[in-house]
């Protein structure tokens, strides 16, 4: 064919092969114009060109194929005013020499074309290729349900390999890019090879699909068979009036098991137990045992997680709003959440809050859960002595149940809650076992992913649980358990911290809880401080809250009974006794006057820090030592060490040897009903003894704390923060502290440090010089 020019129709996503037909619905006005010009000027001939990238918007020379198909318009009809339907028959491939008018968007696109290369195949080779194609296609059509067998009748009548390959290429289900490769393959032998490759590939896909279908059908057949049989049994029972509550219960349990997000092992266990339950006689004593076990497994949260709060600033604000201070535990929670965002393998920490009653340990657990958007539940283990309370009982026992941890997981219905285990220092052990040891498996980060309850009998993952434990005294927690915990010690609040808590939280909460709307209540700061100093003796704020509630109740009662018209009550330090009665504590009055033989020690009790007056008297005797005031063994030993140190250094202290030798010495610590123990009263005992022997008064604005050795060395003590707070509360101005405790000053609140003068000593002779030589 000589060079010629034809109008062009551009196809997107479809290919017209020679000897095949293409149906088009044309709405574009330019394309309609091209069809009309083809009929008038080109004897219905038109060039079908493919856009190489179907999603390309711009029509450019480089985006149009260089091999195209000449088509002849077989039918041209108007469906409606806007749409024209056209059937085009492919004639043969041609090479595109050049596209004309391509830059003129509104004009008809033309192409200059020429014939493609002609390939000659030997007759015998052509016959062999045709037979091969016919055989392969026939087998393929029989295997592929989506291929019409009409193609077979078409190719059986043909004897041109070129025409046959084009017909088959039009039928094979391949992607658009592969269709273009068929169009661009001018050599028919190359098209034969491509067809055979695609047929083999499709046969493999069909084979795989059939295998999947067969497996699926088998699975569905088994499920349908089971469903049909169960339905028949149910209908028969309904007809006989024999259907029971147990039958409907079994169906409900089966639905719950199917919906459960647990692993296959648990599902197999549940289905096995359900079959056992189904076969049991309704009067069997084992029926309820099996039913309860299934219900426990179904009700447990398997892989049910709540979404955590990811904004760490919001978490910090929520914790600050609910609790004053406690920076260490707040920082630890923030660190955990920060690391969790970068690592999905991060295990939840096991935090243990240790501190005196009332400082907010329990409520902090609730605040942590609320701030990070986790569910919360509490387990109280104070006083339990049976390890089955933690691990559960074996199913063989009558009345068996899971332990408290699994019970808490069922109650909270989440796989990542915050669980507060309260009062772990108050667990006891006896012949029933050691519950503290039973907690080890649940709290060990390396083991709790595989926690096993005796009742459940299957492993349960506790690694996503955030455990928060509380205790009042650290030394009472067993060592193996303590080793698995992150200990965060919470000290008591200072007076001003308590004042701040009362103003921001306690007073507002009590007024709201008592629904006091008719009148206004104002409790002045001095009145709150009076309550703290003279009516409470605690490290926390529980008693303070109770006393504030007492004031509110008195006001409400006064309004209701006496029908007073006051709308405003102002509580001051002067009228506080009207609501709370006489003062109970007079700590600040203990150190008004200096006396001979009386020193002021510092003590750390379960209620925080306090002062500890130590009194010494001596009288004629044989050198006996009398100790009173409910002193513990350690404190008694400290008194003996102090006396021995003085005896061995009597010349330095300028004390008569015979006075010590011929006198009985009586040491008493007031408030004798309260037990007292610990080594930190050593230097206070020594100072009181020297004061008595020398008949010299001791400064009552100075308190002492520190352990003394037989050589006079002063050893460090614990609880300096609490002791400093106790000294401050009792108007002490100077505190003598072991030199090695200087590093603990940063833990003491600034408002305490500015009012106290700390004197650091390493040997008792420095203390002696301070009291008796200045």
Image (cartoon, rainbow, N blue to C red):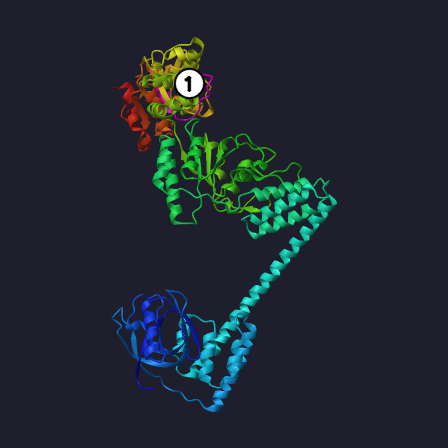
Packing grade of label 1 (10 A; few <14, some 14-19, many >=20) is some
Compared to residue 523, the image places residue 173 above or below, namely below
- Picture layout, residue 495 above or below residue 159: above
Residue drawn where x is 41% and y is 23% of the image = 512
Q: Which residue is mark 1?
A: 547
Front residue (pair 370, 491) = 370
Q: Quadrant of the C terminus?
A: top left
376 or 426: nearer the viewer: 376
Q: Is residue 494 visible?
A: no
Residue 613 placement, left or right of 264 = left
Q: Quadrant of residue 223?
A: bottom right
Q: Is residue 8 above or below residue 260?
A: below
In the image, taking residue 452 as reference, residue 369 lies left or right, namely left
Residues drawn in magenta: 669-690
Q: Residue at x 53, y 79 (%)?
A: 152
Residue extending farthest to the right is 240
Residue 34 percent location from the top left of the image: 33, 73
Residue 670 lies in the magenta stretch = yes
Q: Between 444 and 163, which is closer to the camera in this rendering?
A: 163
């Amino acid at each position: 064919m000589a060079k010629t020019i034809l109008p062009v129709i551009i196809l997107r996503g479809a290919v017209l092969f020679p000897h095949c037909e293409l149906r088009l619905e044309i709405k574009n006005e330019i394309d309609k114009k091209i069809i009309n010009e083809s009929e008038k000027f080109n004897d219905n001939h038109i060039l079908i060109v493919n856009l190489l990238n179907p999603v390309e918007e711009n029509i450019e020379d480089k985006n149009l194929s260089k091999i195209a198909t000449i088509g002849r318009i077989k039918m041209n009809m108007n469906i409606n005013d806007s749409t024209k339907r056209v059937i085009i028959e492919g004639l043969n491939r041609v090479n595109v020499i050049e596209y004309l008018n391509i830059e003129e968007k509104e004009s008809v696109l033309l192409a200059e074309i020429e014939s493609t290369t002609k390939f000659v195949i030997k007759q015998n080779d052509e016959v062999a290729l045709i037979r091969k194609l016919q055989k392969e296609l026939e087998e393929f059509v029989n295997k592929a349900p989506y291929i019409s067998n009409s193609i077979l009748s078409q190719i059986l009548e043909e004897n041109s390999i070129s025409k046959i390959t084009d017909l088959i290429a039009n039928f094979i289900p391949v992607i658009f890019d592969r269709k273009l490769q068929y169009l661009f393959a001018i050599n028919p032998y190359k098209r034969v090879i491509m067809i055979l490759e695609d047929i083999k590939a499709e046969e493999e896909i069909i084979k795989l699909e059939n295998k999947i279908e067969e497996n699926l059908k088998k699975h569905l057949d088994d499920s349908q068979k089971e469903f049909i049989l169960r339905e028949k049994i149910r209908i028969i029972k309904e007809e006989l009036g024999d259907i029971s509550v147990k039958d409907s219960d079994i169906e409900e349990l089966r639905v719950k098991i199917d919906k459960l997000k647990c692993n296959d092992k648990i599902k197999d266990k549940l289905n096995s137990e359900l079959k056992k339950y189904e076969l049991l006689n309704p009067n069997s004593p084992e029926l309820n045992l099996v039913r309860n076990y299934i219900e426990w497994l179904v009700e447990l949260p398997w892989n049910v997680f709540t979404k955590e709060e990811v904004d760490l600033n919001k978490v910090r604000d929520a914790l600050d709003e609910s609790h004053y201070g406690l920076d260490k535990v707040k920082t630890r929670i923030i660190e955990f959440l920060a690391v969790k965002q970068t690592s999905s393998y991060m295990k939840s920490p096991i935090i243990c809050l240790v501190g005196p009653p009332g400082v907010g340990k329990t409520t902090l657990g609730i605040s942590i859960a609320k701030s990070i958007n986790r569910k919360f539940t509490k387990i109280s283990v104070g006083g339990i002595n049976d390890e089955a309370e933690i691990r559960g009982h074996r199913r063989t026992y009558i009345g068996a149940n899971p332990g408290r941890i699994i019970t808490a997981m069922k109650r909270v219905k989440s796989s990542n809650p915050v669980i507060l285990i309260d009062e772990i220092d108050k667990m006891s052990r006896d012949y029933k076992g050691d519950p503290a040891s039973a907690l080890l498996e649940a709290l060990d980060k390396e083991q709790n992913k595989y926690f096993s309850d005796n009742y459940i009998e299957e492993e349960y993952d506790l690694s996503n649980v955030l455990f928060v434990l509380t205790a009042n005294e650290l030394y009472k927690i067993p060592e193996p358990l303590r080793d698995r915990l992150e200990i965060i010690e919470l000290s008591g609040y200072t007076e001003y911290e308590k004042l701040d808590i009362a103003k921001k939280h306690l007073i507002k909460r009590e007024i709201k809880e008592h629904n006091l709307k008719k009148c206004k209540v104002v409790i002045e700061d001095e009145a709150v401080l009076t309550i703290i100093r003279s009516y409470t003796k605690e490290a926390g704020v529980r008693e303070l809250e109770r006393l504030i509630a007492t004031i509110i109740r008195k006001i409400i009662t006064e309004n209701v009974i006496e029908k007073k018209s006051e709308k405003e009550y102002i509580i001051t330090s002067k009228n506080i006794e009207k609501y709370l009665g006489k003062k109970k504590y007079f700590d600040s009055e203990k150190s008004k006057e200096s006396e001979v033989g009386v020193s002021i020690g510092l003590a750390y009790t379960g209620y925080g820090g306090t002062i500890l007056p130590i009194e010494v008297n001596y009288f004629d005797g044989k050198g006996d030592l009398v100790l009173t005031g409910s002193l513990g063994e350690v404190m008694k030993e400290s008194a003996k060490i102090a006396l021995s140190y003085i005896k061995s250094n009597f010349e330095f202290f300028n004390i008569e040897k015979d006075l010590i030798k011929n006198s009985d010495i009586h040491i008493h610590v007031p408030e004798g009903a309260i037990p007292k123990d610990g080594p930190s009263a050593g230097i206070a005992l020594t100072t009181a003894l020297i004061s008595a022997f020398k008949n010299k008064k001791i400064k009552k604005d100075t308190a002492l704390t520190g352990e003394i050795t037989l050589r006079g060395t002063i050893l460090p003590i614990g609880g300096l923060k609490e002791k400093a707070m106790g000294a401050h509360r009792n108007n002490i101005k100077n505190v003598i502290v072991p030199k090695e405790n200087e590093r603990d000053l940063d833990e003491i609140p600034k408002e305490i440090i500015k009012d106290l003068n700390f004197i650091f000593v390493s040997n008792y002779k420095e203390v002696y010089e301070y009291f008796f030589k200045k």
